[in-house]
Amino acid sequence: MFTGLIEHLGTVSSIVRDAGGCTLTISDSAPILDDCHTGDSIAVNGACLTVTEFDKKDKGGWFEVWLANETLDRTDLGERREGDRVNLERAMGAHVRFGGHFVQAHVDATATIIDKQPDGDSVRITFQFPEPTLSRPSLLQYIIPKGYIAIDGTSLTITQVDDVKRTFGIMLITHTQEKITLPKKPIGAKVNIEVDMVGKFVEKSVTAALSGGGGEAYAMAAIRRAKVVPTLSPSVLFLVNTVVNSAAVALVAGRHDGRTHKGKGLICSQLSPVTTRITLQELRNISFTTSNTQTEGKGQ
């Protein structure tokens, strides 16, 4: 587990490739190697990698990590060159202040920098996702304004999202610009993206509840039948906010009889803070039964 607060910038000093992946050597890393052991995890540009060998003094302190082909395909690390700087963060200790957000350092995908604009001493950067595919579906449902995101391992706040253009933006203050590699990347460069893992867990719980259990494909089909879809239109949105440790979200298990959708009991889950987007029209199309009065209604 990581926090997304970058500790140090290291330098790629060696890249050795073979058919199975590559070995990366990162030097100028002494400040994060004082308590290092072989087998420790270090996030490199937001990707959790295992230290296979290290030296605390030579070359300003260096360590080696192995990158499998999956990592090279999923991240921007396969495009790094000798001399490139990379963001480094050690795994979070139980005794330290948690100043960022929950970061697994399991990169979901890459996005491309498409715009950079100064804003006083700060800089605004806009990114775009590629067209979604079956093997790499859209991540936009996990990205909301003022939510958090890990970009090259850095915990950042999202300032704007455009679902239609597949874009989102962030702002970097002066201090952050001096501590990470992102401001030095040019337009057209790729960055590693890890979205909110809490949102993923909530989505899976909700889909399972709506389907009454069963496999993922069945759950997704049940959601579409109930007209509550995971990727929603950017029209007027109805925002349902859950509250920390107190709000229980009642979800109706939809059943399709060929003509109407009727609620068949309530399924309640205790959820972490999350914002769920449902259009008003979609709400009106869902019939449900309340837990106490057994009153059926629409759009209530």
Image: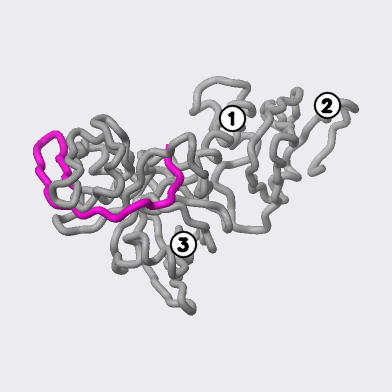
Three-letter amino acid code at the position of disc 2: Ser
- Within 10 Å of disc 3 (Cα), the crowding (few <14, some 14-19, many 20+) is few
Residue 300 locus on image (x, y percent): 82, 42
Q: Residue at x 53, y 48 (%)?
A: 141
Q: Count all numbered tags in the image, as a single digit.
A: 3
The chief SS type of the magenta part is: strand
Q: Quadrant of residue 37?
A: top left
> Which region of the structure is painted magenta?
1-26
The label number, if any, that marks residue 291 in the structure image: 2
In front here: 230 or 35? 35
Report whether 124 appears left or right of 159: left
> How far is the residue under mark 2 from the one under mark 1?
20 Å
Q: Circles 3 and 1: CB distance less than 8 Å? A: no
Visible in this render: residue 222? no
Residue 152 locus on image (x, y percent): 36, 52
In this figure, which colouring scheme has been used for the structure?
Answer: one colour
Q: Which residue is mark 1?
A: 205
Three-letter amino acid code at the position of disc 1: Ser
> How far is the residue under mark 3 from the one under mark 2?
41 Å
The label number, if any, that marks residue 165 in the structure image: 3
